[in-house]
């Protein structure tokens, strides 16, 4: 009797996997790749001499097919194999119970019959894809083929040439024939013609040395699938329900044409129940053997009702993990079997309900489902430091990168690595009033950025999240980088707006859409959403009041000087004389006085309203727009030294604060803005000539202002406006 080695829990899986990999010399896929392939969708076919794996690729059904060719056993080999199996008690019992294992290979090896023969042909394992050998589709054949053979080892025996029923019948016939021979031998022994074998003890009928729990059991088809109905006997039913109507398909011929029709005919209720029981039993056997998959239906069944959304949650998770990338609801509706069996409206409603039951590792973002960490992995954000951020020492809490992190579920404070120095961002102690330094652990204190400098924030740990920051000074930047919005981001938002018909689109949702589509990546520059507008271009997404995005065209505030009239500010001439007197007492000569008068006159022509009345002072946004957009365009005609305009305006606002103490707080930001002389000179020096470059240059000025200033609402009926009209 051949040896009976111990069977491991996954012997067939490991043996089949090693066998397929052994066809390709030196093939050793990584565990991560094997795990990834195991999650992919694959259709397997086990035919005589062939194992075929159909691996769909993408969302349109196109895929590749991998094939393994094996030489089947001949009839002579099968006769020897049946005799060897029947001659070994352990091998025969496990085969007949449906759970053959390593003892089968040992028994056959003793007869020089390999259970896993050498593959045939010059390329026994091949694929019709264009990838080199050892492709993903071949690995799918090994992984999924091994899993199915583990569930039903008779699939591999069918490849070798014998179906399950035929093999079991052959082994049973062999055992029956040799059982008759054993009885004849026992009769001869009673007459003294043959030696007797071991005595049979009748008491052993009730005992066995085997552990009953260790006896292998495998599902199998019954010789009498309607035995339960036979046992129950005739059903106690009245004559009125002895028969039921059934729809029967019939084919009717009319000349050379054939038509299929459905007819209703009466059937005995016992026959209908017998058909139900038989079909259910056969389906259960195929399902237990791994020869068929589950079939979902909407019929009411006994027991706890499993709603489609609960079933869809598991299918959505499996589809997303198999794809390895986020999937939209439309794609999931095609990929999930339960959703595909429903109508479009039902599938969409059930999918929306299923999103509430997803595993914690999955996140829903702008109509997409993906792994939370994958949304941020490899992302990089660009952030231009605004005036308010420079003045307060606090990064804005409503920037697009903060909105992106919040969409994944992360909340501040965040950890940002600035070189070798870890910093905490958006903490309560981060911001300080103007003129005070930021906290020691603040990113602003570590990098000391100025207005117009650019922060690059790369995500190095999505789970933390943890980011790495680098700084580019405004002198080293090219403002035209942000001149034209990224075309990919433009298309993403336009398609989303058209699909959802949501007008306008909130900025937070727009950032989530860009993040879901992978627009925040190295080498891409999706403009911060509140800076995407392009004046006068219809059909593009356009910025609107309240930081909302729509598809209508718009025009931005045109920064031009006003007319030389101040009729509505009657106290301006006297205030101007007092300012001139104060500047004269400070020294500097007549030339400095002329420059101061010219600077203030230019500002007052741009903003001709009253500036010495509390509650009616020009907003800070108007001054920032003047310094960084309007004045640099008119600066050559003013004939002032480069540093004179900003410095003189700072003196003007300081003078107004001294003249009217109630205005000191209102003009604190104005004085700070005029102190940015280097920033003003940068705007003057970078003023371009081309139309496209000029549009980018103007937007750069808005970017320095920041959304907090750009979207400040003007006083009703007042003369100031920096918002989109």
Image (cartoon, rainbow, N blue to C red):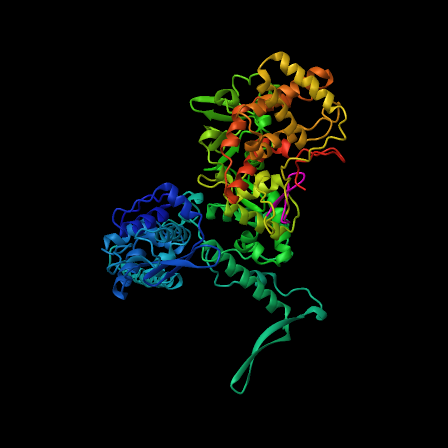
Examine the image and state in which quarter residue 655 appears. top right
x and y percentages locating residue 583 in the rendered image: 63, 16
Apparent side of residue 363 relative to residue 564 in the rendered image (left or right): left
Residue lying farthest to the front in this orientation: 590
Q: Nearer the viewer, residue 356 or 252?
A: 356
Residue at 48%, 21% (x, y): give it.
Answer: 446
x and y percentages locating residue 256 in the rendered image: 51, 86
- Reply above or below: 310 against 85: above
Apparent side of residue 410 relative to residue 36 in the rendered image (left or right): right
Residue lying farthest to the bottom in this orientation: 255
- Reply above or below: 120 against 602: below
Which quarter of the figure is the C terminus placed in? top right
Q: Nearer the viewer, residue 159 or 244?
A: 159
- Reply above or below: 536 against 646: below
Would residue 177 be visible to someone looking at this image?
yes
- Reply above or below: 402 against 91: above
Residue at 54%, 81% (x, y): give it.
Answer: 258
Residue lying farthest to the left in this orientation: 112
Would residue 464 be visible to someone looking at this image?
no
x and y percentages locating residue 501 in the rendered image: 65, 51
Apparent side of residue 77 relative to residue 587 in the rendered image (left or right): left
Magenta segment: 541-553
Examine the image and state in which quarter residue 116 appears. bottom left
x and y percentages locating residue 718 in the rendered image: 74, 34
**Label total for image:** 0
Q: Nearer the viewer, residue 337 or 288?
A: 337
Would residue 720 be counted in the magenta stretch? no
Q: Nearer the viewer, residue 364 or 32?
A: 364
Would residue 542 be counted in the magenta stretch? yes
């Amino acid at each position: 009797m051949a040896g009976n080695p111990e069977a491991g829990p996954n012997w067939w899986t490991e043996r089949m996997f090693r066998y397929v990999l052994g066809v390709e010399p030196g093939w050793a896929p990584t565990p991560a790749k094997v795990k990834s392939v195991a999650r992919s969708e694959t259709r397997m076919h086990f035919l005589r001499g062939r194992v075929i794996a159909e691996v769909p690729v993408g969302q349109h059904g196109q895929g590749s097919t991998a094939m393994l060719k094996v030489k089947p056993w001949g009839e002579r080999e099968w006769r020897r194999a049946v005799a060897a199996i029947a001659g070994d008690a352990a091998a025969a019992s496990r085969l007949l119970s449906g759970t053959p294992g390593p003892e089968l290979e040992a028994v056959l090896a003793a007869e020089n019959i390999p259970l896993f023969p050498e593959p045939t042909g010059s390329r026994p394992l091949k694929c019709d894809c264009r990838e080199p050998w050892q492709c993903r589709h071949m690995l799918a054949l090994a992984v999924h083929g091994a899993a199915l053979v583990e569930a039903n080892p008779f699939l591999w025996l069918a490849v070798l040439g014998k179906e399950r029923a035929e093999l079991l019948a052959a082994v049973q016939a062999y055992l029956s024939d040799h059982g008759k021979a054993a009885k004849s031998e026992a009769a001869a022994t009673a007459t003294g013609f043959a030696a007797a074998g071991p005595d049979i003890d009748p008491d052993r009928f009730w005992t066995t040395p085997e552990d009953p729990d260790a006896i292998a059991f495998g599902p199998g088809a019954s010789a009498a699938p309607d035995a339960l109905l036979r046992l129950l006997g005739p059903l106690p039913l009245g004559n009125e329900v002895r028969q039921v109507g059934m729809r029967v398909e019939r084919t009717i011929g009319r000349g050379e044409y054939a038509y299929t029709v459905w007819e209703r005919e009466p059937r005995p209720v016992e026959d209908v129940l017998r058909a139900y029981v038989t079909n259910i039993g056969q389906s259960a056997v195929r399902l237990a053997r791994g020869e068929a998959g589950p079939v979902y239906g909407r019929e009411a069944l006994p027991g706890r009702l499993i709603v489609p959304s609960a079933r869809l949650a598991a299918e959505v998770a499996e589809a997303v993990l198999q794809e390895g990338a986020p999937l939209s609801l439309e794609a999931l509706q095609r990929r999930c079997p339960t959703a595909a069996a429903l109508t479009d409206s039902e599938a969409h409603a059930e999918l929306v309900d299923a999103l509430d039951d997803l595993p914690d590792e999955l996140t829903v973002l702008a109509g997409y489902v993906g792994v939370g960490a994958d949304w941020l992995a490899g992302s990089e954000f660009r952030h231009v430091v605004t005036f308010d951020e420079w003045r307060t020492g606090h990064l804005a809490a409503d920037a697009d990168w903060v909105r992106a992190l919040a969409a994944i579920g992360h909340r501040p404070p965040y950890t940002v690595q600035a070189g070798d120095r870890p910093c905490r961002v958006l903490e309560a102690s981060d911001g300080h009033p103007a003129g005070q330094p930021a906290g020691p652990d603040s990113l602003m204190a570590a990098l000391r950025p100025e207005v117009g400098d650019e922060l690059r924030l790369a995500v190095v740990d999505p789970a933390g999240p943890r980011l790495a920051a680098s700084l580019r000074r405004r002198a080293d930047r090219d403002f035209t980088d942000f001149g034209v919005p990224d075309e990919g981001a433009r298309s993403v938002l336009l398609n989303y707006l058209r699909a959802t018909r949501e007008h306008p689109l909130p900025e937070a949702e727009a950032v989530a859409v860009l993040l879901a589509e992978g627009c925040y990546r190295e080498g891409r520059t999706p403009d911060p959403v509140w800076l995407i507008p392009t004046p006068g271009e219809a059909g593009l997404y356009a910025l609107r009041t309240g930081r909302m995005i729509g598809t209508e065209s718009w025009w931005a505030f045109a920064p031009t000087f006003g007319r030389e009239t101040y009729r509505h500010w009657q106290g301006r001439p006297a205030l101007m004389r007092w300012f001139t007197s104060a500047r004269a007492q400070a020294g500097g000569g007549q030339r400095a006085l002329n420059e101061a008068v010219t600077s203030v006159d230019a500002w007052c022509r741009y903003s001709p309203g009253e500036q010495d009345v509390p509650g009616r002072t020009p907003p800070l946004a108007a001054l920032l727009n003047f310094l960084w957009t309007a004045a640099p365009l008119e600066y050559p005609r003013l004939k002032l030294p480069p540093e004179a305009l900003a410095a003189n305006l700072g003196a003007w606002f300081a003078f107004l604060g001294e003249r009217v103490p109630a205005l000191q707080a209102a003009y604190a930001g104005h004085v700070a803005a005029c102190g940015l002389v280097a920033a003003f000179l940068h705007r003057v020096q970078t003023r371009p000539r081309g139309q496209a470059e000029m549009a980018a240059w103007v937007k750069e000025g808005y970017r320095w202002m920041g959304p907090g200033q750009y979207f400040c609402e003007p006083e009703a009926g007042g003369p100031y406006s920096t918002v989109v009209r």
